[in-house]
């Protein structure tokens, strides 16, 4: 065990890694001395991120570089880093340096003073982001707060400091579709906010385009709320009431001797009903698909290589490290040698 682990998921972040390593190392040494580890997780990057991580691991004994077998996505890459970290306290931070590493010391002080298990960053401002991104993020967090049964903090991302017992509780949750900030809120314990100003990205471009943002938001809603299913049931109830009223109107018109015309309006009703039915089926299919993925019981991530570190053990994933000394199923598997 070490005093502190800093977990950083990375995807095409070659341009940030040098500055990231320097600032994280300085912040860690200032906070806990030399008893720390930096856990960098390469999430199937297509640039030179993995080669840069290997070079850093050769020169820094405190750095552990983990190379996933493919791109698993930000939340699963973060899960891999958390699962393989060994610190009594764990800091989660992104590689783009929008969340300042220098806040580690004040966050650690807040954790100790308030006897907290989680100190989560709350964004007072979001520099370098478009008005559309700020507006959609603002609306998403408030919609999520109203729709979910869990009290998820507003304007808080994954940037946070966690105690080992809080992290162990998080790692006891093996679900596939992960919304980690919501899962951390769900575990409870004492959690306190830490307000800060978010900076511009140090280099490169965002790895969350609009399509990924929508998918992420839907994972959050379906993972922590049954509101979409309740919405579908409300739609069904409304359609049933409307159908009864329509049947009563048709019966009244027939008995009164009125001719019923309106092919266009009839087709419009059919199209609207069909669209609503397909929407309801899509919502149900989303939940069924989540159940299907969970039932398969696959590991959440697969590690191809590890540079640095010593004796990492996985609970939620599979280590296929080329330097492993064990071939046990579900544990480590070494590459066949010629």
Image (tube, grey):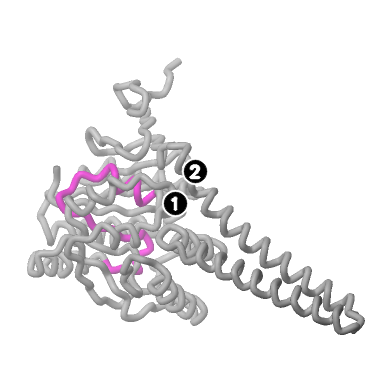
Mark positioned earlier in the residue sequence (2 or 1): 1
The question of residue 81 being in magenta is answered with yes
Question: Residue 206: in sight, yes or no?
Answer: no
Instruction: Count all numbered tags in the image, as a single digit.
Output: 2
Residue 177 has which mark? 1
**Residue 261 on the magenta segment:** no
Whether residue 315 is situated above or below residue 188 in the rendered picture: above
Q: Looking at this view, is 104 or 148 the one in front? A: 148
Residues drawn in magenta: 77-100
Taking the image as shown, residue 190 lies to the left or right of residue 326, namely: left
Q: Position of residue 151 (x, y in %)?
A: 31, 69
Q: Residue at x 31, y 26 (%)?
A: 324
In the image, which disc is placed on residue 293?
2
Check disc 2 and report its element: helix, strand or loop: helix
Are circles 2 and 1 on residues that touch, CB within 8 Å? yes
When asked about the image quadrant of residue 59, the answer is top left
Residue 274 spot, x, y in % from top left: 73, 65
Query: Quick one: 186 or 7, which is closer to the camera?
Result: 186
Residue drawn at point x = 50 percent, y = 66 percent: 230
Q: Quadrant of residue 250?
A: bottom right
- Real-space Cα separation, disc 2 to disc 1, in angstroms: 9 Å
């Amino acid at each position: 065990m070490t005093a502190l682990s800093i977990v950083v998921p990375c995807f095409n972040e070659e341009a940030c890694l040098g500055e990231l390593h320097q600032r994280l190392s300085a912040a860690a040494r200032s906070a806990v001395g030399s008893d720390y580890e930096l856990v960098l997780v390469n999430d199937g990057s297509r640039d030179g991120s993995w080669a840069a991580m290997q070079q850093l691991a050769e020169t820094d004994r405190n750095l552990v570089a983990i190379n996933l077998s493919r791109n698993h996505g930000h939340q699963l890459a973060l899960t891999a880093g958390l699962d393989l970290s060994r610190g009594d306290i764990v800091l989660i931070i992104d590689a783009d340096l929008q969340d300042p590493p220098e806040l580690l010391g004040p966050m650690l002080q807040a954790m100790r003073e308030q006897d907290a298990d989680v100190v989560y960053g709350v964004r007072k401002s979001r520099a370098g982001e478009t008005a559309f991104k700020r507006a959609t993020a603002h609306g998403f967090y408030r919609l999520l707060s109203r729709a979910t049964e869990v009290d998820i903090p507003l304007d808080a991302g994954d940037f946070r400091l966690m105690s080992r017992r809080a992290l162990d509780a998080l790692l006891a949750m093996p679900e596939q579709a992960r919304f980690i900030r919501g899962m951390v809120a769900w575990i409870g314990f004492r959690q306190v906010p830490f307000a800060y100003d978010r900076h511009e990205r140090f280099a490169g471009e965002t790895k969350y385009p609009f399509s990924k943002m929508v998918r992420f938001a839907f994972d959050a809603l379906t993972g922590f709320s049954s509101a979409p299913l309740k919405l579908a049931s409300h739609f069904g109830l409304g359609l049933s009431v409307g159908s009864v009223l329509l049947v009563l109107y048709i019966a009244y018109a027939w008995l009164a001797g009125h001719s019923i015309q309106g092919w266009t309006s009839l087709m419009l009703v059919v199209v609207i009903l069909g669209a609503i039915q397909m929407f309801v089926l899509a919502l149900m299919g989303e939940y069924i698909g989540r159940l299907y993925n969970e039932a398969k019981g696959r590991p959440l991530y697969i590690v191809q290589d590890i540079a640095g570190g010593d004796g990492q053990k996985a609970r939620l994933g599979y280590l296929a490290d080329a330097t492993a000394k064990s071939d046990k199923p579900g544990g480590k598997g070494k590459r066949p040698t010629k």
